[in-house]
Amino acid sequence: MRLRNKPGAMATIENSPQYILTDGSEWRGKWHERFEKQQPLHIEVGSGKGQFIVGMAKANPTINYIAIELQTNAIISILEKQLLEPLPNLQLLLVNGADLDDYFAEGEVDQIYLNFSDPWPKTRHEKRRLTHPNFLAIYEKIAKSEAELHFKTDNRGLFEYSLASLSQYGMLLQEVWLDLHASDFEDNVMTEYEEKFSQKGHPIYRLEAHFVTKK
Ligand code: SAH
C-alpha cells in the first residue's frame, strides 16, 4: 500500500534545503561541507520518525548524523523536529538505502545504524531486508574499513537471519545482545518501535559488527 503524503509535506521539504535533500548525489564525497563541524559521520538507514537519530545527535554533538529514509511521511516528522529545534550535526536524506553508493563516496561513513528494519519475512522478499548481502556490500563500499554496523530489532526471525547473513558475508560480530533492556548496556537511545515493542514485553536484540579488512 502506498501511503498518501501528508498535505504540504513536499512543500516543507522543498523549502528546507539546508536540512533535507531528496537527491544527495551532488554531495557525494563532501557531506562534511553540509555540517558546521568536520567530525565523524554516522548514518541510520530507515530512520522512521527519527526519535533515535535526533536523540543521538543531541547526545553526541561531536558526531555528524544523516537520517536516511524512503518514506516522505516518516522523514517529514524528523524535519519538523529539526525546524523546531535545529541541530547543527543532523542532516536528512529522502532516498532508498539500496542506492547509498550514489550518495556516499568510498570510505565516507564512520558508522552505520539499522533500527527495527522491516522484517520482510517471506523468502521471496529476502533481498529487501537491510541485512541482505547486497546491502552489506553497499555498506562496505561507503564505510571506512574500521566502521561498525549497529543493529537493533525485536524481530527474532530477522535477527537470526542477520546473524547468519553477516557472518556468511565475512563480517566480525563483536557483541550480541539477546535482551538489551535486561543487560548493562549504557546510554541506549530508544527508537519509536523499540518503545512500542518493549512495552509489549518483546525482548530487544542488538548486535555490533564490523567488516574484516581484506589484506
Ligand atoms: N528506525 C525506526 C523505524 C523503523 S520502521 C524505529 O526503530 O522506530 C523501518 C523504516 O525503514 C521505515 O520507516 C521504512 O520506510 C524505512 N525503510 C525501509 N526500507 C528502506 C530503504 N531501503 N531505504 C531507506 N529506508 C527504508
Image (spheres, rainbow, N blue to C red):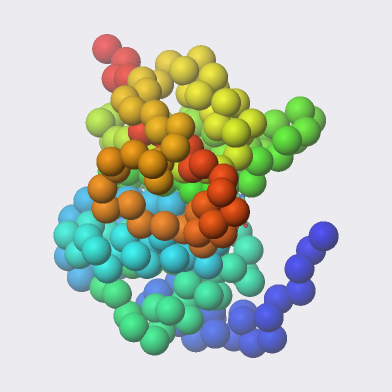
Q: Is residue 204 visible?
A: yes
At x 43%, y 79%, the residue is 81
Between 129 and 35, which is closer to the camera in this rendering? 129
- Pick whichever, 10 or 163, lies toward us: 163
Find residue 61 and report its horizontal and vertical position in percent. Answer: 20, 64
- Residue 5, given in percent of the width and then of the height, sits at 71, 76
Quadrant of the picture in which ligand 1 is shown: bottom right
Farthest residue, direction right: 1
Q: Quadrant of the N terminus?
A: bottom right
- Please tell me which residue lies in front, 143 or 115: 115
Quarter of the figure with residue 63 = bottom left
Residue lying furthest top in this view? 215
Number of numbered labels in the structure image: 0
Q: Residue at x 78, y 33 (%)?
A: 122
161 vs 163, left or right, is: right
Residue 65 versus residue 107 in the image, above or below: below
Q: Is residue 138 above or below residue 55?
A: above
- Looking at the image, residue 98 sits to the left or right of residue 64; the answer is right
Instruction: Estimate the x, y position of residue 105 in percent, counting from the top left.
Output: 37, 44
Q: Residue at x 27, y 59 (%)?
A: 64
Pick the quarter of the image with the C terminus: top left
Towards the viewer: 159 or 92: 159
Residue drawn at x 28%, y 41% is 184
